[in-house]
Amino acid sequence: SFGLVAAESLACGTPVVATAVGGLTTLVDDGVSGVLMPTRDPAEWADAIDDLLGDQRRQDSMARAAAVGGRLYTWSVTAARLRRWW
């Protein structure tokens, strides 16, 4: 899918941790507005989330970048991109 939940999260200024697939690789700027995971290993996900939650400066930086990046996806742009995925 396009990643509508991730787009909404970014628009709210919330960093995203997501699988590096599909539209998520376009939405989430890995290491800037969130973390893209190359694996489905729960232990690696837990470590990535724990690392992010344990670093307030990184969270704040990603939150600012997420909010800026999230503004690029208006409803009309998001709908058009979602339509292309179908």
Image (spheres, rainbow, N blue to C red):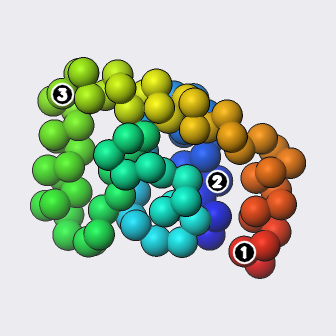
Give the Cα separation between the discs numbered 1 and 3: 35 Å
Residue depicted at x 82% and y 69%:
83
Name the residue that disc number 2 marks: 4
Q: Nearer the viewer, mark 3 or mark 2?
A: 3
Where residue 11 sits in the image (x, y, percent)?
61, 34
Q: Would you say 22 lies left or right of 84 here?
A: left
Where residue 18 sits in the image (x, y, percent)?
40, 57
The quarter of the picture where residue 57 lies is top left
| Quadrant (top left, top right, bottom left, bottom right) of the C terminus | bottom right
Quick one: label 1 or label 3, which is nearer the N terminus? 3
Q: Is residue 24 visible?
A: yes
Helix, strand, or loop for circle 1? helix
Quick one: label 3 or label 2, which is nearer the N terminus? 2
The quarter of the picture where residue 81 lies is bottom right
Residue depicted at x 71% and y 44%:
73
Residue extending farthest bottom: 86
Helix, strand, or loop for circle 3? loop
Neighbourhood count class around disc 1 (C-alpha, 10 Å): few under 14, some 14–19, many 20 upward: few
What amino acid is found at the position of numbered circle 3 in the picture? Asp
| Quadrant (top left, top right, bottom left, bottom right) of the N terminus | bottom right
What amino acid is found at the position of numbered circle 1 in the picture? Trp
Neighbourhood count class around disc 2 (C-alpha, 10 Å): few under 14, some 14–19, many 20 upward: some
Give the Cα separation between the discs numbered 2 and 1: 12 Å
Where residue 72 sits in the image (x, y, percent)?
69, 40
Name the residue that disc number 1 marks: 85
Q: Nearer the viewer, mark 2 or mark 1?
A: 1
Could you say which is closer to the camera, residue 4 or residue 35? 35
Label number found at residue 55 = 3
Residue depicted at x 23% and y 37%:
52
Residue depicted at x 61% and y 46%:
7
What amino acid is found at the position of numbered circle 2 in the picture? Leu
